[in-house]
Amino acid sequence: MELGQLGLGVWTVATRRYYPMERIRERGRALIDQLDGRKVLIYIDPETNTPAALFVSALLGKMQDDEIHLDNGAAVRDGVLFDRRGKRVTVELPGCEIFGG
């Protein structure tokens, strides 16, 4: 890893993982990984051009225009998860302590 490289760090109880922007872009700007037995969507937010993550119940995710379409029929728009009927879904975000909090 190159010092100062932009990316996303994700922490769980058992896992600490870093996703470089370059690797996320190479995977089509959206990918699903597994952390501690749970599926996590890692993507580049089209509006802010920054990496983001949220736990999902899908196996595949694909960026189409400014949305991520998941293989379970759900979609992520503007950082919000919507189910296959278009209803907003409450999600859990992987995270860490916030500096200065």
Image: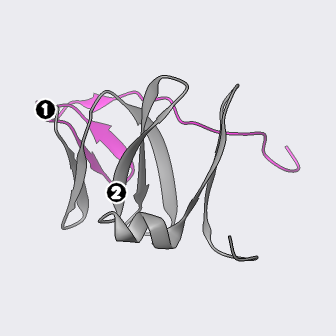
Q: Which numbered tag is attached to residue 84?
A: 1
Q: Quadrant of the C terminus?
A: top right
How far from the left and from the top, in percent, is residue 100?
88, 49
Question: In the rendered image, which residue does mark 2 sit on?
Answer: 30
How far from the left and from the top, in percent, is residue 70?
21, 42
The image quadrant of residue 14 is top right
Q: Main secondary structure of the magenta part?
A: loop
The image quadrant of residue 75 is top left
Nearer the observer, 17 or 65: 17
Q: Is residue 15 above or below residue 8?
A: above
Q: Which residues are magenta?
A: 73-101
Relative to residue 48, is residue 95 drawn left or right?
Answer: right
Which residue is at 17% across, 31% downward?
72
* The stretch drawn in magenta includes residue 98: yes
Q: Is residue 52 above or below residue 2?
A: above
State the separation of the CA atoms marked 2 and 1: 18 Å
How far from the left and from the top, in percent, is residue 93?
53, 36
Mark 2 touching mark 1, by CB under 8 A?
Answer: no
Type of amino acid at the residue the image marks with label 2: Ala
Which residue is at 24% across, 64% downward?
66
- Disc 2 crowd rating (10 Å Cα; few below 14, some 14-19, many 20+) is many
Relative to residue 87, is residue 17 drawn left or right?
Answer: right
Type of amino acid at the residue the image marks with label 1: Arg
* The stretch drawn in magenta includes residue 67: no
Q: Is residue 14 above or below residue 30?
A: above
- Quick one: which residue is furthest to the front in this view? 1
Q: How is the image coloured?
A: one colour
